[in-house]
Amino acid sequence: MPKKKSAQSGSGRPTILQLAKLTGFSQGAVSRAINGQGGISDATRERILKAAREIGYAPNPSARNFKRGYTKRIGMILPDLANTNYSELYENLDQVASEAGYSSMLALAHRSPERERNLLLQLSAGEVDGLVVNPVENLENVDVYQKLKAWRFPLLFIYRGYEDQFDSLGVDYTFSLRKAMQYLRDVGHTSVAYLGPNRPDLPPVGKLVEVIRILDELGMKFDEELSVLGVDSAAEAGQEAFRKWKVLKRRPTAVVTYNDQTAISLFSEAKRLGLSVPGELSILGSDDIDAAEPLELSTLRVDRSLMARSVFEMLDNRIKNFDSPIRLQSLRSEFLLRSSMGPPTRK
Amino acid sequence: MPKKKSAQSGSGRPTILQLAKLTGFSQGAVSRAINGQGGISDATRERILKAAREIGYAPNPSARNFKRGYTKRIGMILPDLANTNYSELYENLDQVASEAGYSSMLALAHRSPERERNLLLQLSAGEVDGLVVNPVENLENVDVYQKLKAWRFPLLFIYRGYEDQFDSLGVDYTFSLRKAMQYLRDVGHTSVAYLGPNRPDLPPVGKLVEVIRILDELGMKFDEELSVLGVDSAAEAGQEAFRKWKVLKRRPTAVVTYNDQTAISLFSEAKRLGLSVPGELSILGSDDIDAAEPLELSTLRVDRSLMARSVFEMLDNRIKNFDSPIRLQSLRSEFLLRSSMGPPTRK
DNA sequence: TTGTACGCGTTATCAA
DNA sequence: TTGATAACGCGTACAA
């Protein structure tokens, strides 16, 4: 544990007091110079800033934040950085925030609701001025969200909303999914299966609902029997799917997957078994992660730079005006046709 | 800008004082209870902690860090999160740190030396107890590094060292590269070309040096003429390479690339041109990013979980004992043979 | 075992 | 334009 260094010890970093002593001005003058405020002559500001640069003085952020009561920093809580979706979103948010004079902070919940809870409580206690959260699970930490709201702490949810009580920014897959399904129909597919983590014993949620509804709209069949639900690990989704189809002695001609990782797993397994993609199996992923493009995987993409801008804009607005009305926004995703989708080969 | 809320206003978060008033104990007692220290009876500790949980009290981190003089937090400065290499390394570091009772903080330099400079100065001023840095460029910010050292601030460099003046953790490609080159020789390749950002007008550095040396050792030829140096963008490396080879009317049978992104670009272009990989072109990448595995790209990999553990261990050691001797450590990488490398087809 | 009081480095208010 | 000074919330030394 590093001992706290006393201010007069020569070794530690310089404080505002040392800079004051060095330049001969008062603490207050130095503070005004550093923070670019008025009430100081250009000459003294110049001299103070020059000295600051020379000795490498930077204000102690803890002391500054503590005193100010705000940080000019926003935080983002994500489950992990497992796919490009997250890392690129954060990268963009950091960029946007810094252009607007904020800094940013990333915290990982590592898929643990308890850790999310602690992060929420700690970060909101003065580490950041506002928080954008992709919640790990559904209803685990709602009490904390409510508490933060009662404390007037700005909170924005992404990818999921909370009963219109908080700002939220989601992704709308309806349009892109419809385009994708239309394409499949147009090239000759009549039914489509699904591969994803949805629990088979519960009513369908999320993207699966949309798929079913859209297929119905388009007069196509959702092949429930050949769908593979409840796959826990994206990495093994492909093997699991082919195992099921082997037992059934039947295969779908087209599969919509939960995300690109799942799709790639399916794709790899198909290749391994010597199947032609898209001839014998058309595959649609989702997210457009890095690996999707070189593999020529069709996917659904949301503009992550735009998403970052929206996220920042919404949160910044809530920070500046906490009592403004709740906003529920949705970003449209687009369909990227690549060669993993195409006409089925006739037997 | 959020106005600072006064402590007595009912809306903001509770402070230690409010918790004291609520429970009827003093500020000091509450502090001791929260921090699990002695000098307090179990009964009162119990009651205070219970009340804290109920109202969701969490100590203000700025105030706490400010007072303590340390943060129990480490920081990591990376150029970006462009590849799995970085995001996974940070993810692992965060995990390791939190297991050791630290929190962690990620900052992105966005490839700007100036931004790196500011981050270095700000974060070291009391945001974190130590910093691990993957420096953006070579000698731009050395003065800051020196200054931090003079201030006794713990600093660890990764992927690059600074003249034995700072702890550093690098990656040693010698062994894995030799294995890869041996494999190429054994299956019948006699010469190897290189594709990467190295400036063609300067003496070779980094991995290229190793490649040349190892090929020489193994009695193989480094094909300088067919090598493509100075490629600025990894995404367009493949096109650039084939353009050069078209002019020369000659192609290498095996190419070592700077990293997986470069390799994938080459791979994609080869496929687009109808070439067989590895028959007509063997390709070696480096980093083992997510996209490498489904593409069956051979690559060089360093165990990122091990790397994170080493990083933390070294930095933690420097934090706890600043005057311990400098450590220069190197992690061995391993060769992953996948189907992008194989025997050349005879004409 | 408990409570009181001081100071950490900074910003901001007020008087000079 | 300047300098002195009062907080900010917390941890802790010391007094009770």
Image (tube, coloured by chain):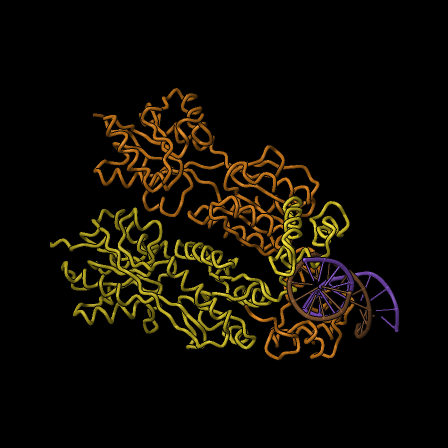
Chain colours: A yellow, B orange, C brown, D purple
Query: Quick one: which residue is furthest to the left in this view?
Result: A347
The image quarter in which residue B253 lies: top left
- Of the pair A169 and A147, the residue shown nearer to us: A169
- Of the pair B267 and B147, the residue shown nearer to us: B147
Q: Is residue A174 left or right of residue A16?
A: left
Residue B331 visible in rendering = no
Locate the C terminus of chain A and report the quarter of the image it occupies.
Answer: bottom left
Q: Position of residue A69 (x, y in %)?
A: 62, 67
Q: Is residue A92 left or right of residue A47?
A: left
Residue B183 visible in rendering = yes
Q: Position of residue A219 (x, y in %)?
A: 16, 70
Q: Position of residue A227 (x, y in %)?
A: 27, 64
The residue at 47%/50% (across/down) is B88
The image quarter in which residue A65 lies: bottom right
The total number of labels drawn is 0
The image quarter in which residue B203 lies: top left
The residue at 28%/37% (across/down) is B239
- Of the pair B11 and A162, the residue shown nearer to us: B11
Query: Would you place residue A247 above or below residue A199 in this image?
Result: above
Q: Is residue A129 left or right of residue B85?
A: right
Query: Would you place residue B98 above or below residue B231 in this image?
Result: below
Query: Quick one: which residue is furthest to the top in this view?
Result: B219
Query: Would you place residue B258 above or below residue A152 in this image?
Result: above
Q: Position of residue A153 (x, y in %)?
A: 54, 71
The residue at 14%/58% (across/down) is A187
